Image: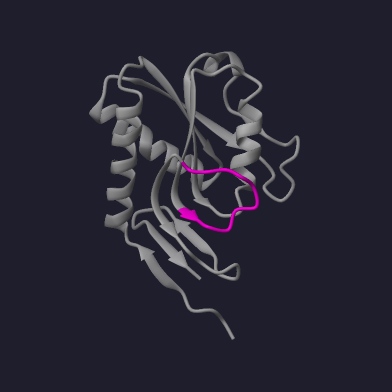
Amino acid sequence: MRPQSNIILTHEQIQHKIKRIAHQIYETNVNEKEIVIAGIAKNGYVFAQRLKEILEDISDIEILLCKVSMNKKSPQNTVTTSIEPKEYQNKPLILADDVLNSGTALIYGVKHFLDVPLTRFKTAVLVNRNHKKYPIKADFKGISLSTSLHEHVIVKFGDQDIAILQ
């Protein structure tokens, strides 16, 4: 029997959540001249791009966008970034992903960035689930869900963004 899909966030709700998170990031970094938003590929990077666009509209802070790539099935030693460590050294950094499921992607992303001194390190997710395998939390989150281990949250970014619980 195929599981039923439920829409948990519509396009408009996703846009609202991303704007709210961007404002929270701005409030946390109001005195900064530059911040780095590192998005975990693929959807985390799309989420990071959206945050960057809004932050550029609401602030004068220079936003440096970074793509974080990893093998999510086996993330040990597979994390790479689109920019060199010297470009984010001694700057505030926000690591972004679309859904915080088990915490594996975020924890290995955090591990990668801890090799370089940062002035502040925060995490942002659109959907935060309560089934973490690792002790990681989202500092900025759009929505928190209590779901079963058998349910999956999928975010589809595009002309009509949607978040689905399956």
Q: Residue furthest bottom?
A: 1
Residue positioned 50% across, 60% down in the render:
154
Residue 164: x, y in percent?
44, 65
Q: Is residue 1 above or below residue 122?
A: below
Residue positioned 31% across, 57% down in the render:
11
Name which quarter of the figure residue 77 lies in. Answer: top right
Residue positioned 54% across, 33% down in the render:
67
Instruction: From the viewer's side, name the closer residue of 140 and 12.
Output: 140
Q: Is residue 80 above or below residue 34?
A: below
Start-end of magenta stretch: 128-138
Residue 87: x, y in percent?
54, 15
Q: How many marks?
A: 0
Q: Main secondary structure of the magenta part?
A: loop
The magenta stretch spans residue 134: yes
The magenta stretch spans residue 132: yes
Residue 38: x, y in percent?
51, 32
Residue 160: x, y in percent?
34, 58
Q: Is residue 45 above or below residue 149?
A: above
Q: Residue furthest front?
A: 135
Instruction: From the viewer's side, name the closer residue of 136 and 50.
Output: 136
Name which quarter of the figure residue 85 lies in. Answer: top right
